[in-house]
Amino acid sequence: MKVLAIETSCDETAIAIVSEVDGRFVVEKSTLASQAKIHAQYGGVVPEVAAREHTAHLIPLLKEVGVAADGEGIDAIAVTAGPGLVPALRIGVELAKTLAWSWKKPLVAVNHLEGHIYSVWLDEEKPSFPALCLLVSGGHTELILMKDYSEYELLGMTRDDAAGEAFDKVAKMLGLSYPGGPEISRAALKGNPEAIAFPRPMIKSRDLDVSFSGLKTAVRVYIAENPNHFVEDVAASFQQAVVDTLVSKTLKAIDQTKPKSVILSGGVSANKHLRESLRSAIHPSISFHAPELSLTGDNAVMIALAGLHRAKNKEFVDPLTLSADPNMRLA
Ligand code: KG4
Ligand code: ZN
């Protein structure tokens, strides 16, 4: 089975073709146009600008993947239907509907978060169920129990900012550019993670929720009170507080749910310190999975992987009525 997937939920326009033969996934084509540089001048993603850029890039990317004019060889089309920015999502959804209708191919609506989870399915060793997923991106921070294919339970989430959002905002306070995650982690390499005792929000609470707004405020206050601060020390100490919080909550979730595997995914999973800390904190009897670096951020390969699973189950949607759902839920 071969799926063409479209992703436009935020600031990356992406199209990929992925096929599955006997349980093995093969990425046939993967294209991506990043808008990060355009949004950097505004310090964050502007939804209408993102939509305009998706409109400009989608057709050239479709040509780049080299699909036949009548879609020959493609078995199904998958598209990110939510969650995400409505103006951005709509552009991909409308193209997917048009292709599905004109090529007479079945259409699958993929949840962006499910896509992030499936980003580890390209690896030889697949996660065993139940799998505990720590999904950390610019828009979401969630602990999800994947009991089986398509069976999800939301265990905890952020009460305010997502982890990636906190990285982006703290980077802005430090005069670093957008997206802030890679900038902070680069600066943190030269800083002392124990230099400043930032709070570990909600680390002691019994539930599996997290909160990053208090930490963000603590960084803002520190910067204001210490005009001669070392950017590298602030970055390293902030990153350490986020990593400690995420690792501690994941361990708590492992304790409660006894998973066979742990999946770390989403844009923030590119963070080397988080990957290594989590990998070494979990018991070796639990398998640890994190996507290859090219699949940590938004991409269409992960949407195709999630779409393939749903297409095999014939979970199709009507190309005439599908609409973008900014609050689409996984569980
Ligand atoms: O998954 P993603 O590409 O988009 C959303 O679905 O939101 O995640 C983007 C987020 C941004 O907030 C970015 O700063 C963060 O991922 N990020 C990182 C790193 N690389 C990207 N955060 C921490 N460390 C990194 N190395
Ligand atoms: Zn994402």
Image: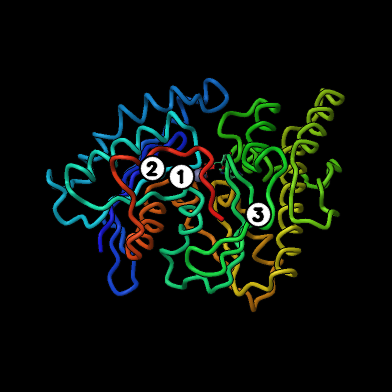
Q: Confirm if mark 3 falls within 8 A of ligand 1.
A: yes
Crowding at mark 2 (Cα within 10 Å: few <14, some 14-19, many 20+): many
Q: How far across and down, in percent of the image, does residue 21 sit?
A: 27, 70
* 2 and 184: which is toward the camera: 2
Q: How far across and down, in percent of the image, does residue 157 sit?
A: 68, 49
* 309 and 318: which is toward the camera: 318
Mark 3 vs mark 2, foreground winner is: 2
| Residue type for callout 1 | Asp
Can you tell which mark lies on residue 298?
A: 1
**Badge 2 element:** strand
Residue at left 64%, top 43%? 185
View quadrant of ligand 1: top right
Can you tell which mark lies on residue 7?
A: 2
Q: Earlier in the sequence, mark 3 or mark 1?
A: 3
Crowding at mark 1 (Cα within 10 Å: few <14, some 14-19, many 20+): many
Q: How far across and down, in percent of the image, does residue 300 sit?
A: 37, 48
Mark 3 vs mark 1, foreground winner is: 1
Residue at left 41%, top 63%? 122
* 166 and 37: which is toward the camera: 166
Q: Which residue is mark 3?
A: 274
**Badge 3 element:** helix
| Residue type for callout 2 | Glu
Q: Earlier in the sequence, mark 2 or mark 1?
A: 2
Residue at left 72%, top 58%? 247
